[in-house]
Amino acid sequence: MITLASDFGTPYPAAMKGVLARRTDARLVDVAHDFPRQDVRASAFWLREVLPYFPPATHLVVVDPGVGTDRRAIVVRAGEHLLVGPDNGVLLPATRRLADSGRDGDTDVDYECYVIDESALESAEPAGTNTGTIANGPDATALCPSEDDTGRPDGPASATFHGRDVFAPAAGEVHETGLEGVADLEWLTPLVDDPVDCRLPEPTLEDERAAGEVLAVDDFGNAITNVPGGFLTGCDHVSVNDEVVPVGETFASVPVGERLATVGSHGYVELDVNQGRGDEAFGLEGGKQVTLETTEDD
Amino acid sequence: MITLASDFGTPYPAAMKGVLARRTDARLVDVAHDFPRQDVRASAFWLREVLPYFPPATHLVVVDPGVGTDRRAIVVRAGEHLLVGPDNGVLLPATRRLADSGRDGDTDVDYECYVIDESALESAEPAGTNTGTIANGPDATALCPSEDDTGRPDGPASATFHGRDVFAPAAGEVHETGLEGVADLEWLTPLVDDPVDCRLPEPTLEDERAAGEVLAVDDFGNAITNVPGGFLTGCDHVSVNDEVVPVGETFASVPVGERLATVGSHGYVELDVNQGRGDEAFGLEGGKQVTLETTEDD
Amino acid sequence: MITLASDFGTPYPAAMKGVLARRTDARLVDVAHDFPRQDVRASAFWLREVLPYFPPATHLVVVDPGVGTDRRAIVVRAGEHLLVGPDNGVLLPATRRLADSGRDGDTDVDYECYVIDESALESAEPAGTNTGTIANGPDATALCPSEDDTGRPDGPASATFHGRDVFAPAAGEVHETGLEGVADLEWLTPLVDDPVDCRLPEPTLEDERAAGEVLAVDDFGNAITNVPGGFLTGCDHVSVNDEVVPVGETFASVPVGERLATVGSHGYVELDVNQGRGDEAFGLEGGKQVTLETTEDD
């Protein structure tokens, strides 16, 4: 199984699926292609929350504001999973979660990173080319002699769609190779330094006060903070940026249209509206500061 | 084959797919994840119209404004299909259609309902947990000791994502079990009373007048009413809330941008604009009243 | 493998998938279902750019503003691919690309077209009908006696969802039949005249000036012109409708929020904003004229 995640919308993910289908019969499952555009941190959060529910798989991730720069393309083995994407941190939070062998203190975070040598990777060649193996990397596929009846333009190569030309071919190859063989692939070399990391921000926690921020807003409009749900233990109400709202176990614990704080499905405090949008009602969006204070009930 | 339908947007359906893929190799096919948010009736309408085109399959449906309340989670066997979702009526119109063995008057509507015992169902456990079987139900997965390098927060359990924690595990299990074995599953018990129903509204039909309402608006903007298409038989024009428009067999029977009434692909009167949005042109949305009157042609 | 592309949004593509799944176990892969509504030319462009990345497959395409008129429904064999859709030109640019056996001058464009005889094609019959084979074409499926407990309306047949009732059954059948057998299918007859064509517009190219137009805007907001990328060779800056912007190999070659011209992944000049929307910044949309002039660098 290969999962795909990007901020591409459509139809670019389909080109990646075609490239994958030329290399593997693996099932292809979309995680999302509407991640907040070029937002590495929010994408990293969602991947960390979703990918651990999958059985061992290859995960192709392209949220890549630096496409075409000298940022590296990497493959990560994390436990029994493989991840393929840009070296901009987007893979790291999920990597740590997938590589975590336990929760009992002697955590053995088990992962390895490799750099993709793009010039040695056989790239995506579309139908209607007779160029065979692309020796000089993916961009060579765009070098064609002249406009002809097939409507193919001439011109210099593109450097803007590594999802199709680098990451998808790499994902197809490592998936077919499997966990054991990745270390032997000629176009992969172990990272000598650390991959670029992405750390989700930590809240400041006191007994009755938590200063955090919004990690992401989901499609329901629930504003997911970085404050652990435990902060709300035993509280009936909480002050959110100085406005007091009820704490509920479920959305339906308040009337339709009313605000509340819950512990969301990720384990964090979420700020919601029953059958409405919490982000709008609380004036919140990704990255916004949130101060929570537990209040004495009258 | 397992179909998935929800009002989740992304990426929550991917977590459900991961949970399913841990339990079954069945093909996963999306029906839609942008059903009108928490709109049980419109979702029920779409499921009734779409699911009957599938071969025998398991259908996972999560449109669930009452998540976390004491509304039941159910499994329905309807003919050769299985449906899994909340007991709020969203499954019933499709159930009746799927269970219908004929159209010849002696209709034998063949379905059975079961309640899911959430505490006995093995839930979704993500990678990076070493908790094994979740004896106490899905929420236990969120109970973890403390924030650590994997970024997993501590805190009380979530009650807000039963799609991932209840319905997807149940759908994977019943799919693997098959139609014959469902009755023997320990975590399913036959419903002793009736499931919650959802009846789509019936129009009032007279010879030359139909008083109905809009069941749903599709992504083209076609306003789908509950008035059977037969009402338009023999009509060249129809008055829609007192505005007369042509009746056409196809959108292209009127100029681009013009309004018309058609018999849509569901067999109902639809109010459309050729290459435009009928809902906007007629001022309609789901639930709005529509009065149709056939007019004498001059 | 069967790919699906349409302007349907949801959930109509799911009905097509159900119809396909009754006929074949082939993998189903979405290309896009949010093509610009009823925009044959933009859809034809995207299909030409995406489908060639797939291995030999059947491609089901429904962008069909003339549904229900006397426009023909066709099947095309293009090289090792099969395409199924309306005869309105949407398949032709991809057909030429898929059928192109080489780039070396003696191009042998290898494709054949067939007309679907809708009255001879076994159509889609949903569950809850006992009509068996539909002898009189797809619309017969909507002819049912009367409203009953299954909520099925009576009324005349629909002529508006050929994706479900004609193209999907045809795609499932030709996929199962395979390339060799298509010519022998009883419900297919070779086209005696040419299929309706769709030619993407050609730019006017001079040494330092190109007059073209926007073919499509992608989901990032990049405005993709029909000017071959080669026009920018050796340029540091280009004038776009009289406004000078830098030419960059990558989005990141200009600061975030700044405009630039690149050679996009399709080989054409694209007008972009680094981490922003080029269409808005340049005031462009599909079909708009673009005049590019190379400028002397000071």
Image: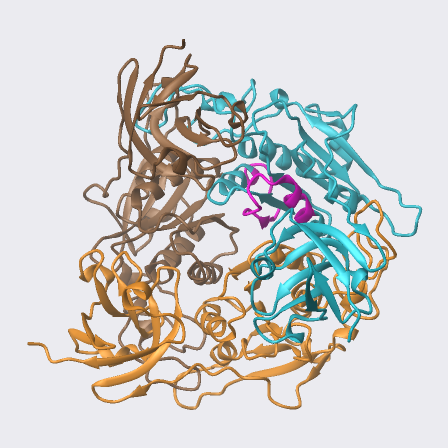
Chain colours: A orange, B brown, C cyan
Q: Is residue C30 magenta-colored?
A: yes
**Residue closest to the eye, C115 or C174:** C115
Quadrant housing residue C95: top right
In the image, residue A9 sits, relative to residue B148, either above or below, namely above
Please state if B256 lies on the left or on the right of A227 as rendered. Answer: right
Quadrant of the snapshot with the N terminus of chain A:
bottom right
Residue A126 place in picture, x, y as percent: 76, 55
Residue B159 seen in render: no
Image quadrant occupied by the C terminus of chain A: bottom left
Q: Residue furthest left?
A: A298
Residue B185 location in percent, x, y?
33, 53
Of residue C28 and residue C59, the one placed in the foreground of this image is C59
Q: Quadrant of residue A112?
A: bottom right
Please state which of residues C202 and A237 is positioned toward the viewer in this rendering: C202
Q: Position of residue C186 (x, y in %)?
A: 70, 23
Left or right: where A71 falls relative to B86: right
**Residue C291 or residue C105, whichever sits in front:** C291
Please report the bounds of the magenta region as a residue range. Answer: C20-47
Residue B22 seen in the figure: yes
Residue drawn at x 73%, y 59% is C269
Picture coordinates of residue B267 (x, y %)?
41, 26
